[in-house]
């Protein structure tokens, strides 16, 4: 029997696009119902779409596979935003107050609006992680109600390349797929693979993908830093391929033989790994190639953790992503990053169930797409699939199944959610209308003040004063004659 209630999420990775469908159970666990994968190296690089048509075709293929497995149409999907198009930037907003002024929520909201209005070349603010507020000389998470003369808001702005986001929207529009929500993938991942203790005590979440490695640093339950490094597990494959072999053969050798760390004693002798029927490579050479690239990735990761945060990572480093599946990756991190506490997150903190042919329980590469699905809240199921008709729903079917959601304002969206282009445009239009209305009100007030000032100026002219004096004198004479 086809499922009638499920959530669909799609992750656009550098090596593959993954679609997953499942539902959340009453006990908080997740049941996976269907998974679909397609290679993406021909149209996605470092997590960024560069061929819209090929990406749209891939999305249609992914959704078509899921629909056939689920035997129902898919009306909307949750989509992860990540890759090298995103990064974080710190920003401060200050407010000087009269003595003994009590901080209000309106002041805090105003500072937040000022921060969101920041403009960055070719990039847009998609989400904001509030750090702390400096109230005079003290740091506070909530400054409302405190008397102060100086208020400073510290923010971590998560930026995304405008061109990439437009391409991403165009892909789904071309594929005729409705977007339930865009979710910032690193934040979704952190919410579902990190424990509360790790986020509070401080940790670096390292998502090792194919062409990028994303580093998210948390302390006191707050995102402190986010960076995407243009290095990943595919770089190891390319280095192996430099031994004059096809990339596919290099990938097989990596999966079969590669290790992030190898003991020196294991390299003794003349052991070799077979490349093809006639050629082989010495084990020592192979190990040097793999470990050299792994060391470069790890040192880059540790370099991009801010120096002031390194000694605050009491929970150490949490590794995930396909690159974390490489043998002995924990030992390599301990060696090259000088971190003792290492954990590999191969699944989510909540229980995940799925048939073994759909999902390998120890595959860290599925954590991001599972996290996207875990954050979904709207039903993505449509009508029962007509195997003899159109595989994709019409606009009317989409509206009937998913409803017309009112576009959210920037201030109303949940943390980690990116407004779609339509929602952003609607919010900008309303903001512009409000600004124009406020400007018109101010101009009207200025005109009224100017008219009042002109009237007062005319009233106080000497000739007008003389004329009023004569009129008053005349009224006095008339009054005196009447009395006589």
Image: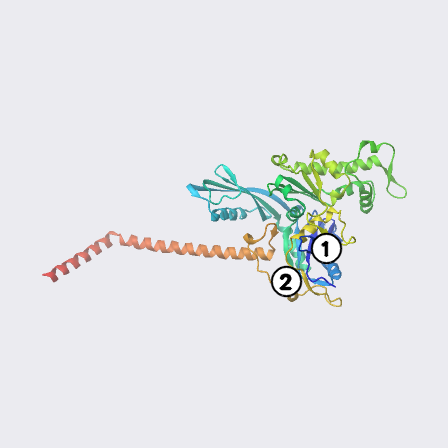
Q: Residues within 10 Å of mark 2 (few under 14, many from 20)?
A: some
Residue at (54%, 48%) from the top-left corner?
116
Are the residues tagged 1 and 2 within 8 Å (C-beta)?
Answer: no
State which mark lies toward you, 1 or 2: 1
Q: In the rendered image, which quarter is residue 197 located in?
A: top right
Q: Residue 241: where, in percent of width, then height?
A: 80, 42
Where disc 2 sits, the SS reads: helix
**Height in image: 140 above or below 43?**
above
Is the residue marked by circle 1 packed among few (<14), some (14-19), or many (20+) residues within 10 Å? Answer: many
First in sequence: mark 1 or mark 2?
1
- Disc sitting over residue 412 in the figure: none
Question: Quadrant of the rendered structure where residue 335 is?
Answer: top right
Residue at the extreme left: 484
Percent position of residue 384, x then y: 71, 66
Residue 421 located left or right of residue 106: right
Q: Is residue 10 left or right of residue 469?
A: right
Left or right, residue 131 beside residue 389: left
Front residue of 305 and 69: 69
Q: Secondary structure at mark 1?
A: strand
**Residue 43 shows up from this direction:** no
Residue 402, numbered label: 2
Residue situated furthest front in the rendering: 27
From the top left corner, tell me how far across and down residue 173 is, in percent.
66, 59
Residue at screen point 57% across, 53% down: 413
* Residue occupying the point 65% across, 44% down: 195
Residue 68 in view: yes
Instruction: In the rendered structure, find residue 32 and report the number of the disc placed on it.
Output: 1
């Amino acid at each position: 029997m086809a499922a009638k209630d499920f959530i669909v999420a799609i992750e656009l990775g550098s090596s593959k696009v993954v679609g997953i469908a499942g539902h959340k159970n009453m006990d908080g666990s997740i049941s996976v119902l269907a998974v679909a994968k397609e290679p993406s190296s021909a149209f996605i690089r470092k997590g960024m779409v560069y061929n819209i048509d090929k990406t749209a075709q891939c999305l249609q293929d992914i959704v078509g596979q899921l629909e056939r497995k689920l035997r129902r149409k898919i009306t909307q999907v949750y989509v992860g935003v990540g890759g090298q198009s995103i990064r974080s930037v710190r920003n401060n907003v200050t407010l000087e107050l009269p003595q003994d002024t009590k901080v209000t929520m309106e002041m805090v909201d105003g500072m937040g609006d000022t921060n969101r209005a920041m403009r960055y070349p070719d990039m847009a603010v998609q989400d904001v992680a509030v750090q702390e507020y400096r109230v005079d000389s003290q740091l506070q998470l909530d400054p409302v109600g405190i008397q102060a003369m100086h208020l400073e808001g510290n923010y971590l702005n998560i930026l995304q390349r405008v061109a990439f986001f437009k391409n991403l929207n165009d892909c789904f529009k071309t594929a005729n797929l409705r977007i339930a929500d865009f979710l910032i993938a690193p934040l979704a991942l952190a919410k579902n693979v990190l424990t509360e203790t790790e986020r509070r005590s401080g940790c670096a979440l390292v998502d090792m993908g194919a062409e990028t490695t994303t580093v998210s640093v948390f302390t006191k339950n707050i995102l402190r830093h986010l960076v995407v490094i243009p290095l990943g597990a595919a770089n190891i494959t390319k280095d192996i391929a430099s031994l004059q072999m096809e990339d596919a053969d290099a990938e097989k050798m990596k999966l079969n033989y590669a290790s992030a760390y190898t003991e020196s004693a294991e390299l003794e002798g003349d052991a070799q790994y077979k490349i093809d029927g006639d050629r082989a490579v010495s084990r020592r050479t192979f190990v040097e190639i793999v470990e050299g690239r792994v060391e470069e990735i790890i040192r880059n990761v540790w370099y991009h953790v801010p120096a002031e945060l390194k000694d605050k990572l009491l929970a150490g480093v949490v590794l995930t992503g396909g690159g974390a599946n490489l043998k002995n990756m924990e030992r390599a991190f301990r060696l090259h990053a000088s971190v003792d506490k290492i954990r590999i997150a191969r699944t989510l903190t909540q229980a995940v169930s799925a048939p073994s042919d759909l999902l390998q329980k120890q595959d860290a590469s599925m954590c991001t797409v599972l996290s996207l699905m875990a954050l979904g809240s709207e039903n993505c199921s449509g009508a029962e699939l007509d195997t003899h008709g159109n595989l994709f729903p019409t606009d009317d079917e989409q509206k009937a199944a998913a409803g017309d959601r009112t576009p959210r304002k920037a201030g109303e969206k949940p943390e980690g959610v990116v407004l779609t282009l339509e929602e952003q445009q609607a919010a900008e239009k309303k903001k512009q209308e409000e600004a124009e209305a406020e400007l018109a009100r101010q101009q009207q007030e200025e005109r009224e003040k100017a008219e009042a000032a002109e009237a007062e100026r005319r009233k106080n002219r000497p000739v007008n004063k003389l004329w009023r004096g004569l009129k008053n004198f005349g009224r006095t004479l008339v009054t005196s004659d009447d009395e006589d």
